[in-house]
Image (cartoon, helix red, strand yellow):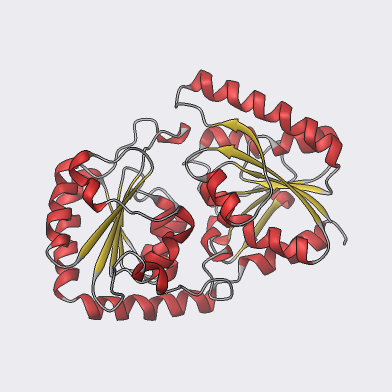
Amino acid sequence: MRLLFDLGHPAHVHLFRNLIKKVVSEGGDVLTASRDKDVTVDLCNAYGIPQRVLSRAYSGNFVDGFRELVQRTVKMLRIAKRFKPDALLGTSMSIGPVGRIIKRPSFVFNEDDAAYVPLFANFVYPACTYVVTPDCLKHEDYGAKHLMYPGYHELAYLHPDHFTPDPAVPRSIGLDIDKPYYIIRFVSLKAHHDIHAGGLPIEAARTLVDILSNHGSVLITTEGELRDEFKKYQYPLPAEKLHDVLAFASMYIGESQTVTAEASVLGVPSLRCNTFVGRITYLKELEKKYGLTIGYLPDESDMLIAKTQEWLEDLENVKRQMQTRRTKMLEEKINLVDWQWRTLCEKLSI
């Protein structure tokens, strides 16, 4: 089996890294096209994934974004013609057109609703061979090309079959896993689907830092440059260590969809704040069906602060409840890597 992966975002590295490992262990060949965005390249290096960096993430301007897409697609076509993959995989605007040109199937993985990423869905889904989504997106119908599974992207790397948190990691930065510490995440909100998006208001962020720091240590992780007033709380470790630290945290609060989902599948009490709350089905399922997270719009930040204080007053009980809910979720969801492998073997007749 020869597979070409397009890894354009740090979350994509995590989504496919265990599948890449599986393919190689089964004697297959892998070619990885990465993108210089945030810590994507660093994560590939950390996990020993050989990569070819095809482009640098655009600044947020639509024209720059289109220019990067064209550049990236042309480069991918060149390497695909030489590599001759059996299939192309990614959460990518490029692999569908490239797959069609070289006459190979493309598998586009996405866990966001099409309404949340309309440009991506309208451009990518018609061109790809298969649209792969969690089954909570069953309201979206792409016919025979729609492959659904009971799970989330995060279960490709945080399922217990793949991940056991290492307590030595938080201890290496002076954290006691038997004492409370809290993680806050800020994101840049500069992706094409983030136009007019908003996150946690700065005053609310300051209030939360003050409240949490009175109950334990606070770590802040961010996509961009952290404000000077928060730099003493800055997360100090490489990105690939974050999950080990997150798993032992007493609470996560942030603007990131991905880290919210990661905290949820780990059973860490989590609160999120951005303008996408209520619009993303897989997060709605984690919240409404499993009770593993709560989302607030930016103008509801006072409610988020109140919920934070409520949880702090009954923290050990809240943590136990989340672990119980996590167990129920894991009973109903799958190890995504096993599903990825079986589906590839079936569709490629291998």
- Residue 285 in view: no
Q: Position of residue 338 (x, y in %)?
A: 68, 69
Q: Position of residue 131 (x, y in %)?
A: 66, 48
Q: Is residue 139 above or below residue 188?
A: below
For residue 25, side relative to residue 59 (left or right): right
The quarter in which the N terminus is drawn is bottom right
Q: Quadrant of residue 243?
A: bottom left
Q: Residue at x 26, y 76 (%)?
A: 318
For residue 206, side relative to residue 178 (left or right): left
Q: Is residue 307 above or below residue 326?
A: above
Q: Is residue 135 above or below residue 224?
A: below
Q: Residue at x 28, y 74 (%)?
A: 176
The quarter in which the C terminus is drawn is bottom right
Q: Position of residue 121 (x, y in %)?
A: 58, 38
Q: Residue at x 17, y 54 (%)?
A: 209
For residue 343, side relative to residue 44 (left or right): right
- Residue 59 in view: yes
Q: Position of residue 262 (x, y in %)?
A: 44, 61
Q: Residue at x 55, y 58 (%)?
A: 153
For residue 16, side relative to residue 175 (left or right): right
